[in-house]
Image: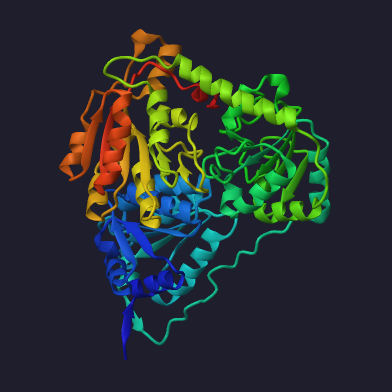
Amino acid sequence: MTEVTGGELVVRMLAQAGVPRVFGLHGAHLEPLFQACLDHGIDLIDTRHEAAAGHAAEGHARVTRMLGVALATAGPGFTNVLTSVANALLDRTPVLYLAGEAPLAAAETNTLQGGIDQLAVARPLTKWAHRVTSIEHLPRLVAEAIRIATAAPAGPVLLCLPVDVLMAKIDDTLPWYPTCLDADTPALPPAERVTAAIELLAAARRPALLAGTGLWQAHGEAALQRFVAASGIPVYTDYPAHGMLPSDHRLHGGTYHKLSELPAAQRPDVILALGVRFGLFTLGRSETLLPHTTRIIQVDTEPKELGLIRDPALTIRADCNEFLGALLRTANGRPWPDWSSWQQAIATATVTRRARLESEARVMAGVVHPYHAVRGIVEAISEDTIVVADGAECYHWLNEVIQQRRPGGYQAHGMLGAMGLGMGLALGVKAAQPQCPVLCLIGDGAIGFSIAEFDTMVRHGLPIVVVVCNNRGWNACRHLQEMTAGPERLIGTRLENARYDEVAAGFGCHVATVRDRAELAPALRAAFASGRPACINVLIDPVPFPPELLLVSL
């Protein structure tokens, strides 16, 4: 009789689900999982902190639109990964978190890393969380976790795995291995609501489409491009959806915040919102972007999102890709109105905004204006580069100029606003897309959360180029203090001019320091050409304030 461990059963299910790699940090409670990954050829990328492992699993899931997997040991390993769990919940990212636990037999004995109820902590932060108490149930419950994580709307699930369950052994002929790992069927839109949506759009004078995470996760880029070509309706995108319509497309208006560039009386009168979570990036009830008179057609798979913030004219609970397909079929051959003047107004607003930012970007010796820095980055990188953005002000500056032609090519903060996630996201993105250059733009505050992940990049041969926008402070908070308390009341927002490049060099990375915008493009070319992980420390003018940040609702 051949016996197998509980860890073997878990990893067999991951292999059956087609999981190519997992991210984690070793702990004794996880040893059976690590050994089984070795036996099954599942790549294990071990990070220097569990938070980075969780964010890497998120990055992997985001760009592949498939399940990501993170391993965290019991106790502090579990608590360290919780920021990632919460982030995945708010961003609807399908991640399976496997958390080790103290032995069931040692309950209430003050054993090592066993003093908290991990399941109770995890439940409010996940779609589903469960503790496995018997080895024979492991395959069934792992399969259940995978189905729940990947079903729309996707999100995080967590399994607590006591070490005595993982180390237990069972006759290899006894376990049942479920084959149903994808039970999600895309929700189809009701035909009458598709027709109603067409009528609302056709009657609009200034229609616009907001493409959200739900459209990206539904693989809706081809349908989006066909619909825009047929209808002529301009598109604004959030970060995961950026690139679904190429940024240089004549009908792409940019990120949602760019609606603010239009005069208040010339904002959209009808919005088609596809997989959009109204709130932070759309400013809820505020008329800064969308007047209260704007009629909204809201399409989403999650019923609780429909009408949650804005009162829609029409709600459609459906898969966004399926909805667009139905819209194209129903409207096939129908003439759409001539919206050329509206299209031109959006194009003019884009050009005007760029010209204003360019004229306002002062040149100072020894530092680079943040607008010049991000523009220089975008102009220097290749078309297939995937960009990951972290930090407060630096990624708001990047939003002004980001140009992506590929879907999923821009990954940034979600509604949690989790600083320090960039290095982890970039690890997962590069592991999933090794053929694509990956650039991580990060602030000097945010990089302090995870600077040791340069070591992870080096050990696992992941040549990510990290650009640190070094303005020597927590600048978004500093600017807030200056506006509300006065420049003489700064506290807790200053950072010294640390040499982040020298820290990276200590881990074996290619490094450079940039003090002038003319130095940036050559530094980037050299970094990518090195074939190694790289850190470019760019000294940034701390005074300018990104205009987009003024629109973020607190």
At x 50%, y 56%, the residue is 65
Tell which of 285 and 215 is nearer to you: 215
Percent position (x, y) of residue 147? 54, 65
Tell which of 7 and 359 is nearer to you: 359
As drawn, the residue found furthest toward the bottom would be: 1
Q: Is residue 116 visible?
A: no
Residue 527, quarter of the rendered image: top left
The type of colouring in the image is rainbow
Tell which of 33 and 431 is nearer to you: 431
Percent position (x, y) of residue 205? 79, 31
Decide: is 13 above or below 509. Answer: below
Decide: is 374 above or below 245. Answer: above
Decide: is 269 above or below 143. Answer: above
Q: Is residue 98 left or right of residue 26?
A: right
Q: Is residue 258 left or right of residue 163?
A: right
Residue 363, quarter of the rendered image: top left
At x 80%, y 41%, the residue is 336
As drawn, the residue found furthest toward the left would be: 506
At x 66%, y 54%, the residue is 321
Percent position (x, y) of residue 526? 26, 40
Residue 38, quarter of the rendered image: bottom left
The quarter of the picture where the N terminus appears is bottom left
Q: Is residue 378 visible?
A: yes
Q: Is residue 309 left or right of residue 67?
A: right
Report the label total.
Answer: 0
